[in-house]
């Protein structure tokens, strides 16, 4: 069965946003909401930050935007060198855009252009994973294993091959640990061989799955194992870090945790923390050099790529993250928050799994802990819980369909990196009460 889209809960029912301050948002009636998920894991340093707002205002006073083919700018240059420093010496080129979808779209195009520049234009095919989300533009949606969001567009999407999700709670073949990692890597290798390596451009995956799975980190060693497979067959590896990157998982690049460097990486959301839309496709030096040497330009980007004021906003956000050591805080405090949530929610027999990394934590609800069977889809539990929490002044991110595309209920908790101890305690407390009330219908 299909169930109603989980995107929002009806415009007419939405309150009007009035202002934001730190970890709180306020609507026009004065009602206060604790931002427990950054909306969809976007608001990395909270709301209404004066320093970021001042940087934006100062930039607007000078000039809003210098068009990318006519000018460079100080914020663009400084942001680029900061991001390349944060990402590591392997990376050498950045394509800016306005959304995670565009950043993924550019990642796919950079891969295709690289193979064209190398004289291997037959490498056109992408491999992605089931239960994944990479964006809403047609290319990014094509590589997304997200039934609910793909269904109306079936037939118009790219022909993409899918391999299993890397999910320790719902594992391929019931395997665990190293055996699971090995099986997933083998599955990818077989897929590449079946397609013919000479036809495959890239493999794309989220190091920690966001909306499509409810914050699912891959099993230990997974990223290194799939990278070895890709390397054996000359297939590029694209990491979609739009949700899990920019510090959200406690390292600036999510794959730092796995000691792995992808060929191309997409970031967005926390990069500019929601102050102004900005996303980026970050490309290994050798790929960019090949494209530039052979074809003169990376053929992707948009009118507002590298928008000057968006870069000024992101630069201010990133400087605050650096100065206040927020990525390290997420790494250390994230493990505590996970343990606190596991402790508080363990008493609900419908809570099957509490997992995640850093400040990207997923809670999965089940009918039965032993079988891990999902709740009946028609109950739309995650949506109901999201609404309950919202009505009680807590923002969390409900996700549905992580079991077979139509069943499955999860919520994501993803607070601002600089949320205080008291705010995190309030988050755990409010979420526990919202779950209790949703389960009991109270
Ligand atoms: C992993 C991932 N990739 C891409 C996107 C698309 O980003 P956007 O909504 O900014 O286009 C998202 C959005 O949720 C995401 O979570």
Image (spheres, grey):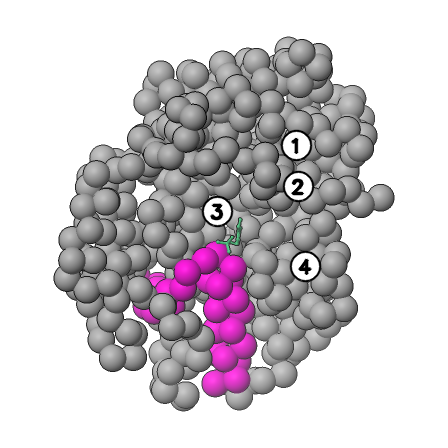
The label nearer to you, 3 versus 1, is 1
Q: Which marked residue is nearer to the observer: mark 3 or mark 2?
A: 2
Mark 1 or mark 2, which has the lower sequence index? 2
Q: Residue furthest right?
A: 1
Q: Quadrant of residue 349?
A: top right
The CB of the residue at mark 3 lies under 8 Å from ligand 1: yes
Of labels 3 and 2, earlier in sequence is: 2
Residue 302 coordinates in the image, percent (x, y)? 41, 72
- For mark 1, what is the residue? 383
Label 4 Cα crowd, 10 Å radius (few <14 / some 14-19 / many 20+): many
Q: Give the range drawn in magenta.
A: 89-117
- According to the picture, the residue beneath numbered tag 4 turns out to be 188
Mark 4 or 1 closer to N-term? Answer: 4
Q: Mark 2 points at which residue?
A: 6
Label annotation for residue 243: 3
- Label 2, residues with CA under 10 Å away: few <14, some 14-19, many ≥20: some
């Amino acid at each position: 069965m299909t169930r109603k889209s989980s995107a929002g809960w009806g415009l007419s029912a939405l309150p009007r946003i009035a202002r934001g301050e730190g970890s709180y948002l306020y609507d026009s009636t004065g009602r206060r909401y604790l931002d427990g998920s950054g909306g969809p894991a976007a608001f990395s340093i909270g709301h209404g930050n004066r320093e970021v707002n001042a940087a934006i205002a100062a930039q607007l006073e000078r000039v809003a935007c210098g068009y990318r083919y006519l000018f460079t700018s100080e914020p663009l240059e400084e942001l680029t060198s900061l991001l390349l420093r944060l990402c590591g010496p392997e990376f050498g080129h950045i394509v800016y855009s306005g959304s995670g979808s565009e950043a993924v779209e550019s990642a796919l195009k950079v891969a295709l252009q690289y193979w064209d520049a190398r004289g291997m234009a037959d490498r056109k095919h992408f491999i992605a994973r089931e239960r994944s989300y990479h964006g809403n533009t047609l290319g990014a949606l094509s590589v997304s294993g997200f039934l609910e969001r793909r269904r109306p567009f079936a037939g118009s999407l790219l022909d993409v091959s899918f391999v299993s999700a890397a999910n320790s709670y719902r594992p391929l073949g019931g395997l665990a640990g190293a055996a699971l990692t090995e099986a997933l890597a083998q599955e990818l290798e077989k897929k590449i061989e079946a397609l013919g390596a000479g036809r495959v451009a890239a493999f794309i995956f989220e190091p920690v799955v966001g909306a499509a799975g409810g914050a699912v980190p891959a099993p230990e060693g997974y990223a290194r194992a799939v990278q070895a497979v890709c390397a054996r067959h000359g297939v590029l590896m694209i990491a979609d870090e739009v949700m899990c990157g920019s510090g959200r998982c406690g390292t600036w690049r999510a794959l730092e945790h796995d000691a792995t460097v992808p060929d191309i990486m997409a970031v967005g959301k926390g990069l500019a923390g929601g102050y102004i839309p900005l996303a980026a496709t970050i490309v290994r030096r050798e790929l960019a050099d090949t494209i530039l040497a052979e074809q003169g330009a990376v053929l992707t980007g948009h009118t507002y790529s590298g928008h000057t004021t968006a870069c000024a906003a992101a630069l201010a956000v990133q400087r605050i993250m650096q100065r206040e050591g927020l990525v390290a805080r997420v790494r250390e405090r994230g493990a505590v928050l996970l343990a606190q949530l596991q402790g508080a929610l363990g008493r609900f027999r419908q809570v099957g799994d509490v997992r995640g990394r850093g400040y990207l934590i997923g809670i999965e609800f089940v009918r039965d802990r032993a079988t891990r069977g999902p709740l009946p889809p028609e109950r739309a539990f995650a949506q109901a819980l999201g609404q309950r929490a919202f009505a009680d002044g807590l923002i969390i991110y409900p996700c549905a369909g992580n079991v077979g595309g139509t069943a499955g209920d999860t919520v994501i908790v993803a607070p601002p990196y600089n949320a205080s101890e008291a705010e995190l305690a309030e988050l755990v407390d409010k979420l526990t009460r919202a779950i209790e009330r949703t389960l009991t219908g109270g």
